[in-house]
Amino acid sequence: MDPKKKFAQIKAAMAAVVNGAKAAGRDITEAELASLEQKAEEAARLQKSIDMMDRGTAILDLFKQGDDNDGEGSSAKASFLNVKATARSVAQKAIGTSSDLVGVEFIRGIVPIDRPRTSLLQAIPAIRRSSPVYEYLRQTVRTMNAAPVAEGALKPTSIVTMEPVEAKLKVFAHISEPIPKYILEDNDEVQRFIESEFVNGLDLAIQAQLVSGSGTGENPLGWLNASGILTVTGVDLITTARKAIERLTANGRTPSFIAVAPADWTTALTTRNTSGNFDFGPTTPVNEAEMKLWGVDVIESPAVTAGTVWTLAEGANSLSTDGKVDARWSDSMSDDFARNLVRLRVETRVNSDVRTPSGIVKGEIVPTP
């Protein structure tokens, strides 16, 4: 029988015993008490099974969100490197083998509505590639000439030019210093903490390349070095962002998010109006609670240089990935084995695909002298 149905039946049977005693105006008998205790133990076991089933279902649902997609369709906007949404292929491992692979699969979890994003990787659609070498299309020309046309007259021609771009996934990796293996064996939390810190390090490195990658060698092409992006200037963050949004919407594009330096967002939140009050909220351009500016999501990123504001339209940039991060503990380096030391190596393969340069606006904040 389905555990949930069985649990419901046991719960109903227990309630029937208690309610029967109450209706009769008597205490629960010894036999009834023994029966209730037995049913309670069985219910507890079933509850554990149900919890495991629910967690497994949730993970499978997230995997369905991130099925392989080598086409040009968009996937859910979500975090590629999300420590809280992981499914380990090895649940428990023994530190001390010469090479112990921890297959950490990072699922592209859904970002709940109205919850601020904390990384650029949560805002950019991820596409899982089945091969490290792939091809995508980049828009190079967009000229819209639609107009009213008289009957029998020649229709105007609009031009949308796409070029194929050959690309490959880039390896992002780092290793730890030697760590005494018994520290990890004696405390699982230490191991999980170190792994999560190293995953966060990958996140920061990828964000930096998304913004300013050179596009040469093993560096992805970042927004800063993409040909064909738009530019605007303003006296402050609020004005600059509004001008960027205007450039996108004037071209029929929908703004997706605004990336700012933490210092510039702090300035926007702490600037007082002429009455000496802070001027932000749901009815003003700045909404601190929801991390929005002019109704568009704001992401504070250390990858963004202070004084620069990036505004991206939907579909302008995507992140290609093999869909996982590998964390491998090893004692095979140097004399680590002889010293009971292990090291962690964490790596992943990703690349930034700049699909629509004209959907990326670089804003420069130039305060009035």
Image: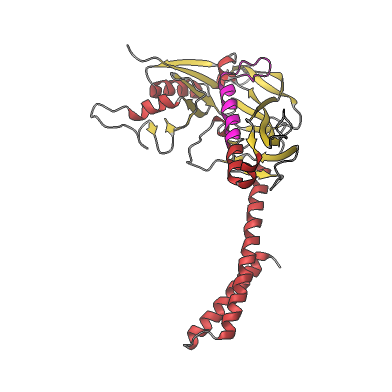
Q: Is residue 269 left or right of residue 308?
A: left
What is the magenta range? 197-221
- Where is residue 211? Give x, y as percent: 55, 21
Instruction: Note whether 202 is above or below 16 in the view shown.
Output: above
- 211 falls in the magenta region: yes
| Majority SS type along the magenta span | helix
Q: Is residue 59 visible?
A: yes
Rendered view: 9 above or below 274? below
Above or below, 213 against 202 in this view is above
Q: Position of residue 250 (x, y in %)?
A: 49, 22
Is residue 219 part of the magenta span, yes or no?
Answer: yes
**Where, by quadrant of the figure, is residue 52 drawn?**
bottom right
Q: Residue at horizontal 62%, vertical 75%?
A: 38
* Residue lying at 58% horizontally and 77% vertically, measured from the top left: 36
Front in this rendered view, residue 131 or 31: 31
Task: Return the x and y of residue 156 as percentages of the image width and height.
Answer: 61, 17
Residue 136 appears at what percent x and percent y?
Answer: 70, 24
